[in-house]
């Protein structure tokens, strides 16, 4: 009893004891957060041990700084460092819940470009239990003010302070050695940030990410034309011939891309309580005039929607960390779809979006891509009932876009960005035309309602196209940008799919999103080919009859019989018709069973596939981070001059509304077609 009393007295009345209290409390809450707030997938004794121990070394190192100070200042500096580390933990809990990833320097640097109306989502993301990470801090403050913890004003010897910091450095080194032994090439080959956190810790990940960000800046400064040669060599050796049967079948047609926000493939033909969630998209998916892809995957990373756009427009992957559009969209040279179509086939190019133009740095990146027109929220009539989450409701957005679409000189390349089917999947009662699911997961259960709303909006737009005859002049492209239900909702996902369980392999299959090319007279069908967003541009260019051999693109024509069908995920995972990789495990794609003991031949094949994926991702990163396209100058391509594009509403609309004999408006005897657009949006009822 005396020993316990002496120990408690040491904890509460000795500076080193106070240091231990704060350190142990932080260690414990971080470990609990690892287990309850994140899905790190630790397997085996070594991984679980490292997960348990890794919050400690960095905490000792950083909180140990407070020991160098004298008197009360020492206590408050230790507490301040504890508070900062706790805020970092709290921020990552919220970010992970929404994006299944960890905050990075790149994301924080570009947060201004993604800060539009995030408050509502954050409120939806926060769980009351998240605030428990601050409980220990509050208790310790209370113990200080109640004088249970008393200040020890004696200074510690410098040698002792240095010993504490040295111990922290040794622990960090040992942690790294054990991690490298269990996961070879952890810091050099992995594309998944959760591995860094699982093995080394959240604070070490922040340091690693900061180093990688600085390294990336240095890479751009050092990049030269020889780096491009290795990329060209790789692309040449891995090129495939496009499908000649489909070459040019859409030549001269308008291209209308509908970006289906957070829309997953499982929604196609999905019914809830006997009602089809997406009847219009179902019809389009099965149409004889549609080329639909059943095994088409999103391939986004932290940049989510912006990564999808990067692949769609450039056939380049998003980055391992952050958003390429945000970080590099203002300064990099690109050879994007808008510029290619303008220069090779005189297309008018435009994007319409019912959200803020600065989101994901679009107002700058689109100029680098070569878009002539960009109509963000400022171009639209916005009233409180019109706006939800990240922008105008889709029906209202489409109805107001007609006046711009009909003025575009034809042929045009137009992208419409929808937003209503975005987390937190909320829609007002008047627009709820289908019941919520009943999994009990609040994040998931509203998903079918907003997806149904998006489908209705698409149906209204398609009806207008048919009434005006635009459908006969247009190839329609619809694609899902990324998942709507993240990998943190296994139980709810299993219930939606009516499965007994939901494995990591199931989650990889869950990354499928729709891809549909629809055009009058197109020889359609549902294709089983495996592909991803990186492949959309090469496929579209072949359909349009535009030569795509002299470009730097990492995708392939999905209709080619020689398509490689290796679908890379941004974290290094992949799926093919035969095999898949999730984390460090391999699976049989057809059975979904893990390949636990591959023979020597199969193991070599699996490793070879993994190396191909790693190489492709690395080379694509090199193109973006090194700005290598500044060195690539094909004869047919003229470098985009972004300063020539002005998205100022007054100037842009003055140019757009000038008479052009190829626009729908002019061809309709200079009369608007808006009256032919019918919507049941209750907000627009008179």
Image (spheres, helix red, strand yellow):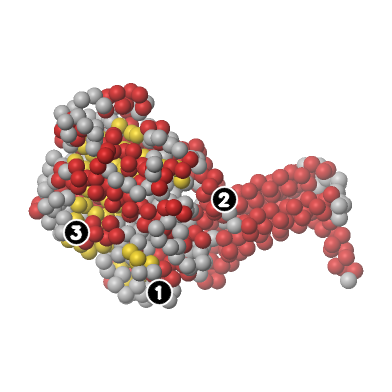
Regarding residue 236, the answer to whether it shows in the image is no
**Residue 182: x and y, percent?**
49, 65
Mark 2 closeness class: few <14, some 14–19, many ≥20 residues within 10 Å? few
Q: Is residue 154 left or right of residue 542?
A: right
Frontmost residue, 473 versus 576: 473
Task: Identify the mark nearer the N-term, 2 or 3.
Answer: 2
Q: CA distance from mark 2 to mark 3?
A: 41 Å
Callout 2 touching callout 3 (CB < 8 Å): no
Say which residue label 3 marks: 287
Question: For the residue carrying disc 3, how many other residues have a C-alpha within 10 Å: few (<14), some (14-19), or many (20+)?
Answer: some
Residue 514 at what x, y percent from top left? 29, 57
The numbered mark at residue 232 is none
- Front-most of 533 and 79? 533
Q: State how far apart marks 3 and 1 are (Cα).
A: 29 Å
Disc 1 versus disc 2: distance between alpha carbons? 31 Å
The residue indicated by pointer 2 is: 123
Quarter holding the N terminus? bottom right
Choose between 36 and 73: the one closer to the eye.
36
As helix, strand or loop, the secondary structure at mark 2 comes to helix
Query: Who comes first in sequence, dot 1 or dot 2?
Result: 2
Is 139 left, or right, of 116 in this rendering? right
Please tell me which residue is depicted at 50% across the width and 42% down the height of the picture.
117
Q: Quadrant of residue 349?
A: top left
Per the rendering, the mark at residue 499 is: 1
**Residue lying furthest left in this view?**
245
Q: Residue at 33% of width from left, 53% of height from top?
A: 456
Q: Residue at x 19, y 56 (%)?
A: 291
Disc number lying in front (3 or 1):
3
- Which tag, 3 or 1, sits closer to the chain's start? 3
């Amino acid at each position: 009893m005396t020993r316990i009393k002496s120990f408690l007295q040491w904890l509460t009345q000795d500076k080193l004891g106070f240091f231990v209290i704060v350190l142990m409390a932080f260690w414990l809450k971080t470990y609990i957060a690892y287990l309850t707030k994140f899905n790190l997938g630790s397997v085996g004794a070594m991984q679980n041990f490292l997960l348990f121990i890794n919050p400690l070394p960095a905490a000792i190192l950083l909180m140990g700084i407070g020991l160098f100070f004298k008197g009360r200042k020492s206590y408050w500096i230790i507490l301040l460092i504890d508070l900062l580390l706790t805020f970092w933990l709290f921020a990552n809990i919220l970010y992970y819940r929404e994006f299944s990833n960890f905050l990075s320097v790149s994301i924080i640097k570009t947060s201004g470009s993604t800060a539009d109306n995030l408050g509502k989502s954050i409120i939806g993301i926060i769980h009351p239990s998240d605030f428990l990470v601050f409980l220990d801090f509050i208790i310790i403050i209370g113990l200080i003010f109640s004088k249970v913890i008393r200040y020890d004003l004696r200074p510690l010897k410098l040698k002792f302070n240095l010993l504490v910091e040295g111990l922290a450095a040794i622990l960090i080194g040992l942690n790294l050695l054990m991690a490298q032994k269990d996961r070879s090439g952890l810091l050099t080959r992995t594309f998944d940030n959760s591995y860094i956190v699982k093995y080394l810790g959240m604070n070490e990940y922040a340091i690693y990410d900061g180093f990688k960000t600085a390294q990336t800046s240095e890479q751009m400064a050092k990049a030269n034309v020889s780096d491009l040669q290795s990329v060209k060599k790789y692309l040449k050796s891995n090129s495939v011939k496009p499908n000649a049967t489909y070459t040019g079948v859409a030549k001269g047609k308008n291209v209308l891309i509908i970006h289906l926000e957070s829309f997953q493939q499982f929604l196609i033909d999905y019914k809830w309580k006997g009602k089809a969630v997406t009847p219009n998209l179902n019809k389009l998916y099965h149409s004889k005039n549609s080329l639909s892809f059943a095994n088409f995957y999103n391939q986004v990373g932290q940049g989510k929607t912006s990564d999808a756009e990067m692949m769609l427009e450039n056939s380049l992957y998003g980055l391992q960390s952050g958003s390429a559009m945000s970080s590099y969209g203002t300064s990099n040279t690109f050879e994007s779809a808008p510029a290619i179509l303008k220069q090779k086939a005189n297309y008018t190019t435009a994007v319409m979006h019912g959200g803020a133009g600065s989101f994901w740095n679009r107002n700058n990146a689109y100029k680098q891509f070569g878009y002539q027109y960009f109509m963000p929220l400022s171009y639209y009539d916005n009233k409180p009932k019109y706006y939800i989450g990240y922008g105008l409701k889709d029906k209202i957005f489409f109805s107001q876009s007609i006046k711009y679409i009909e003025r575009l000189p034809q042929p045009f390349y137009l992208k419409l960005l929808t937003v209503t089917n975005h987390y937190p999947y909320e829609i007002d009662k008047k627009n709820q035309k289908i019941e919520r699911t009943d999994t009990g997961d609040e994040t998931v259960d509203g998903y079918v309602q907003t997806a149904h709303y998006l489908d209705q909006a698409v149906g209204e737009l398609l009806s207008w196209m048919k009434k005006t005859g635009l459908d006969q002049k247009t190839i329609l492209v619809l694609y899902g940008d990324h998942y709507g239900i993240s990998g943190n909702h296994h139980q709810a996902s299993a219930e939606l799919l009516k499965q007994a369980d939901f494995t990591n392999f199931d989650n990889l299959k869950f990354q499928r999103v729709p891809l549909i090319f629809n055009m009058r007279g197109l020889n359609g069908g549902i294709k089983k080919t495996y592909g991803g967003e990186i492949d959309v541009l090469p496929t579209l260019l072949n359909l349009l009859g535009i030569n795509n051999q002299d470009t730097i693109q990492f995708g392939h024509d999905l209709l080619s019989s020689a398509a490689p069908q290796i679908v890379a995920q941004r974290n290094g995972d992949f799926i093919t018709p035969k095999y898949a990789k999730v984390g460090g495990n391999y699976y049989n794609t057809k059975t979904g069973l893990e390949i636990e003991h591959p023979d020597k031949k199969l193991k070599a094949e699996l490793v070879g596939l993994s190396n191909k994926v790693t190489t492709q991702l690395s080379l694509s990163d090199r193109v973006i981070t090194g700005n290598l396209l500044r060195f690539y100058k094909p004869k047919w391509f003229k470098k985009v001059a972004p300063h020539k594009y002005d998205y100022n509403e007054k100037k842009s609309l003055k140019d757009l509304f000038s008479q052009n004999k190829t626009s729908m408006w002019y061809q309709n005897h200079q009369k608007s077609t808006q009256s032919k657009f019918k919507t049941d949006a209750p907000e627009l009822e008179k």
